[in-house]
Image (cartoon, grey):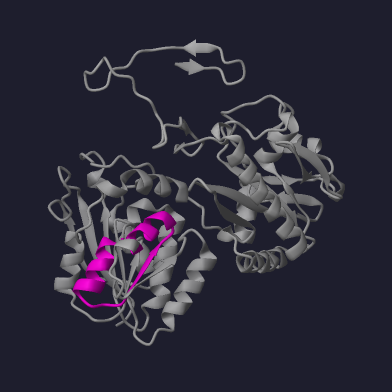
Amino acid sequence: MLREHVSGTVVGRTHHVFGGVDDRTVDVVDRHGDPLILDKYGRLIRPLSLEGGSTLDELMDQVEALLATLRDRCGVPAFIAYGTLLGAVRNGQLIGHDNDLDIAYVSDHAYPVDVVREAYRIELALLADGWAVRRGSGSRMNVRLRLGDGSTRFVDVFTAHWVEGVLYIPQDTGFELPRETILPLTTVDLLGRQVPAPADYETLLAATYGPGWRTPDPSFRYETPRWLARRIGGWFGGLRTHRKQWDTFYAAQRRALPRKPSPFARWVARRYPSDRPLVDVGTGNARDAQFFAVRKGRPVTAVDYTIGSMLWARKRLPDDAPVTFQVINLYDARQVLAFGYGLSRWDTPPDLYARFLLHGLEDVGRDNLFRLASMSLRAGGHLFLEFRTVEDRDRPHHFAQTGRRYLDPDRVVAEIEARGGRVLHREEGTGLAPFRTEDPHVCRLVATWTD
């Protein structure tokens, strides 16, 4: 059944049978029997509109405490923003299909580098006060709120600041609006509470959501202008670029993924035995990292930016396993440069290992991986790669993934050589990486940056 969001009018109805069983009803619910909805990222979530009054009261208690911490402990005026502000101004409620809340604080700094420095100061203050904080970029944080029923809710914390008369609230706001649009703060009613809000919230909402902002539209998606996305990315970087698709993949397929070491890991260990440190870039569920650390005794740094999969992988490792985890986004040049510099200072140059990573990266991410190799392998060590080739495009695939690319090995070799590397070994074909009924066409490369 397809129902119109505002009026509740049924606009479509059909009957679907799963597995030939036509006498059962399928309900999409959580373990408590509460209905789930599909959010804008394609995840099944329990919307805020289904929470009971006591849960919402507990949630709002924590949101008010967080706003007070930002104001009193961190010294910055804070207010509800984006969808949370939209729901409050419309009808004093949270938007029915939302699953998190949005707040922002005002920075008086005129230069992005100072905005970032202030943001990290605020993060440290929040951590010191006991808040669970995860940083998304130089100007965006996510605070996790643990509720009494065991559920977790999230509050996105944005930075509002002006540069040359333009108000930025990254990632999606970049409008020529005066300071009087935000300050001094006023209040609006949200779930029966007076919470801080921008001074001219109607102008801000119209600029953000368009002139029809008062009419609910569950299908609304931000269309961030290219100039704004590039500017915000250049100023503040970010851990979120392309991360949602992998968060969704690992959340859905976590138990279906193999845990034994891959054939490529065994091949590397057999053909290039070593006790030097190994950096597993794009570690995923860390099955190969565990193999090199536990079975081969090598110190391993497992790198990824899908935090959930790494937390799950860490729980499976023995306590004494020589594995450390690090969150790195290969689309963030700042992070890559800082990480590469750190690796270049190690007493023993590492090996870089990247299995089934390359074909999941866009051009800029692939280039940053080779930049990382160039920085960290000048004094020794190897780069080990295994990736899908163009010959694999039309072959059967076990997992249907978005964003998968099929690479020409000649092009990859040319990119490595352009970064100063030299390919020592190359082979390609099937039979190298079989998985269940899938036998992909892959390429294996081993490269070095030394003579």
Q: Is residue 230 above or below residue 426?
A: above
Q: Residue 307: percent from the left, percent from the top? A: 43, 57
Quarter of the image for residue 414 reads bottom left
Q: Which residue is at the front of the view, 330 or 437?
A: 437
Image coordinates for residue 435, horizontal then vertical, percent: 17, 49
Residue 419 seen by the camera: no
Q: 74 above or below 407?
A: below
Name the side, left or right, on which 13 lies relative to 433. Answer: right
Judged left or right of residue 275, residue 106 is right
* Residue 279 locus on image (x, y percent): 34, 71
Query: Is residue 300 shown in magenta?
Result: yes
Whether 425 is among the magenta residues is no
Q: Where does the N terminus fall, quadrant-wise? A: top left
Task: Please give the name of the residue rendered at 54% of the width and 67% of the height, measured from the top-left corner.
Answer: 334
Q: Which residues are magenta?
A: 286-314
Q: In percent of the image, x 57 and y 60: which residue is there?
A: 133
Left of 336 or right of it: where is 395?
left
98 lies left or right of 205? left
The residue closer to the viewer here, 17 or 432, is: 17
Give the mark count. 0
In the image, 319 versus 2, the foreground residue is 319
- Would you place residue 218 above or below residue 333 in this image? above
In the rendered view of the protein, which quadrant contains the C terminus?
Answer: bottom left
Is 199 rendered above or below residue 332? above
- Residue drawn at 74 percent across, 49 percent down: 79
Task: From the top left corner, tell me how far across and down residue 217 is, in percent.
Answer: 62, 26
Q: Is residue 430 visible?
A: yes
